[in-house]
Amino acid sequence: MSLEAMRKDVVAAVDALSGELIQLSHAIHAEPELSLQEFKASARLADAVERHSLPVTREAFGMKTGFVAEFGEGPAVAILSEYDALPGIGHACGHNVIAAIGYGAAIALSKLSADLPGRVRYVGTPAEEAHGGKEVMARFGAFDGVDAAMMIHPSNMNLITMPTIAVADVEAVYHGKAAHASAMPFRGVNALDAVVTAYSAIAQLRQHIRNTERIHGIITDGGMAPNIVPERAASRFFIRAADIHDLHKLKKRVLACFEAGAIATGCRLELNWTGADYLDLKTNWPLAENFKRHAEGLGRSFFPVEQIPVGFAGSTDMGNVSHRVPSIHPMLAVAPPDIIIHNPEFTRWAASDSGDAAVLDGAKALALTALDLMADGTTLARVHSDFQATAELSRLAVSAVEGEHHHHTGCGCR
Ligand SMILES: [Zn+2]
Ligand SMILES: [Zn+2]
């Protein structure tokens, strides 16, 4: 079977699946589940895969809400589906669209049956918004032996990559001593004061960091009543920097701010680093260009990456995959440019007609990109050599994440 014939078949397969894909996207959207709790979404996807007579392993690679389905022989491509949502604002990151795209691409490729020129490892990857599920799964071997990994994220514009920085997630808990706040304040040790001192110190620090760096947080516990000196108070912060090495330096400076709160008040400080740090995304450019050509063929035009302003960046645990195997994480528009991601308006767009259009375009473009990699040795060689050019830096980044001595409070294996 020629590559051109296979391309036609894969696109036709996505069209034939379109009703099922949109229904899946909407069903996941209607029942948002937080990181590590995506039991319904993962079961929905795994059940759907089984209905196409493909074997599924649930609770895969150390994650209770992860799964994997693998089929075919030859060059191997991991296709990923995320499906977690955000507290309070549901699918404001549109992971329902990611889920349906990954599923659609994998199932469409499976319809080539014996003609499929490679191997597909379709992986359900939970806990992206928190806990770094892909880092856990990577350590359990989820991406071992594949030639590339790919997924698509929804956005307010079409981009062949996502501008990203590394991130660490930390909860700082202070332990003081309760006392009557009026009768005997001198017997109390005020944990809220420790949080406020640390918050102020971090606010001061923020003027003196790079414009690629971010520190942002919330107070999660501020005491129980005004007439009780707070015995316990807590905050949660995200710390972000261009790469893992800058992140380690910035974490030390933030740690000093947390310690300042403890020293000033006499509280005991407890730091809980949640999950693993997220690495910056290493985009495989030959693969991204290949994706771009296919998406343009479907009528999409892309915003030039070089025009994205400095500092306009989020983070993803796909970063941790991208330093292990050649990866892409392009973005497809589901909303107009003035709609912001992680905002309730984006939640509505994620299940709109343009969200549905992105599901179909995304599934087609992803399947076509995977197909090229499997069928065309030249593309595969270019993808490998692009990855190898910075392989040593990637190895250092991965070992920096694996070498962290964090107190893990939540990963899928708990
Ligand atoms: Zn998000
Ligand atoms: Zn997201």
Image: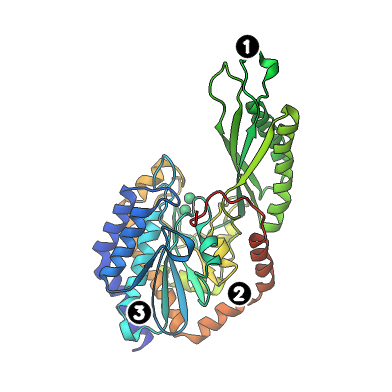
Please, what is the three-letter code of the amino acid marked with disc 2? Phe
The image shows residue 104, relative to residue 4, as above or below, that is: above
Which numbered disc flags the more N-terminal residue, 2 or 3?
3
Return the residue nearer the eye: 341 or 310.
Answer: 341
Assign a secondary structure to mark 1: loop
**Contact check, label 2 and label 1, Cβ < 8 Å:** no
Mark 3 residue element:
helix
What residue occupies the far bottom of the structure in this picture? 1
Position above or below: 263 against 46: above
Q: Foreground residue, 277 or 147?
A: 277
Residue mark closest to the camera, 2 vs 3: 2
Is residue 299 visible to the viewer in this orientation of the structure? no
Q: Is residue 394 left or right of residue 290?
A: right
Closest to the observer: 113 or 142? 142
What residue do we see at 72% from left, 27% from top?
265
**Label 2 vs label 1: CA separation?**
64 Å
Q: Which residue is mark 2?
A: 387
Q: Earlier in the sequence, mark 3 or mark 1?
A: 3
Give the percent coordinates (x, y) of residue 162.
53, 59
Instruction: Kindly report which numbered mark, 3 or 1, lies closer to the viewer in this rendering.
Output: 1
At which x and y percent is residue 137?
Answer: 51, 64
Residue 182, labelled with which disc? 1
* Residue located at (71% from left, 43% from top): 255
- Image quadrant containing the N terminus: bottom left
Does 87 sit left or right of 381 as displayed? left
The amino acid type, in three-letter code, at marker 1 is Ser
Residue 129 visible:
yes
Between circles 2 and 1, the one closer to the viewer is 1
Which residue is pictured at 66% across the width and 13% down the height? Answer: 184
Residue bearing mark 3:
7
For the rendered model, the colour scheme is rainbow
